[in-house]
Amino acid sequence: MRRLPVTVLFLMVLLIMILAAAPVMAADGAAIAGTVYHDVDGDGWASPGEPGIAGATVYVRLPGGATLTTQADSDGNYIVRGLGVGDYQLWAKDADSNASATQDVAIGEVNAAVAIDLPIEYDLSDDVILQAASNLFLPLVNR
């Protein structure tokens, strides 16, 4: 019976140890995480003082077309785990059905975690001013 030289045996054990310690790849279960927040200044970026939206529903359209949902926590943070390689679409809605824009996300072989914030803008225009203007000018037009 032939024996393997000690050097070859050592290299084989070393290779097995290296492969076992390899980083987690996206195919092993990727995640998308982020925050749903009220974009007060409308710039699309989370700025200091812009509050997270508690309980917002985050939608994730999978590569096959199915949609997953998850809820944001009390600070507006969310995480979706167990995803694989592919292209995804994310958006969020608050309790009043105000929605964020859809974000496209690509998960490749090496980016096993992706951070995506989902800003929701609110129409904060004052409708009372418009109503007051119509009450003032419409009677003049109808004369």
Image (cartoon, rainbow, N blue to C red):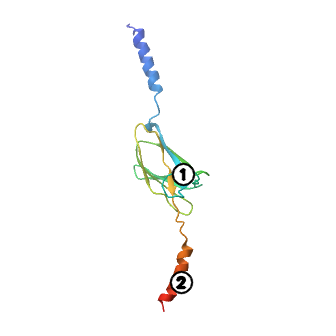
How far, Cα to Cα, is label 1 from label 2? 39 Å
Sequence-first tag of 1 and 2: 1
Q: Position of residue 40 (x, y in %)?
A: 54, 58
Q: Residue furthest left?
A: 2
Above or below residue 44? Residue 125 is below
Q: Residue at x 52, y 47 (%)?
A: 34
In the rendering, at what x and y percent does residue 95 appear?
57, 61
Q: Quadrant of the N terminus?
A: top left
Where residue 5 sits: x, y (%)? 40, 8
Going 50% across and 85% down the picture, which residue do you hit?
138
**Left or right position of 26 against 135:** left
Q: Position of residue 28 (x, y in %)?
A: 46, 37
The correct choice, above or below, for 67 with respect to 86 in the image is below
Decide: few, some or many residues near mark 1? Use Cα within 10 Å; few <14, some 14-19, many ≥20: some
Residue type at mark 2: give it. Answer: Leu
- Residue 47, labelled with which disc? 1
The residue lying at 51 percent from left, 60 percent from top is: 121
Q: Secondary structure at mark 1?
A: loop
In this view of the protein, which residue sits in the foreground, 137 or 83? 137
In the picture as drawn, the residue positioned furthest to the right comes out as 74
Q: Is residue 82 left or right of residue 48?
A: left
Q: Say which mark, if any, is on residue 136.
A: 2
Circles 1, 2 touching at the beta carbon (< 8 Å): no
Residue at image position (41%, 16%) is 11
Indicate the amino acid at tag 1.
Answer: Ser
Total numbered labels placed on residues in the image: 2
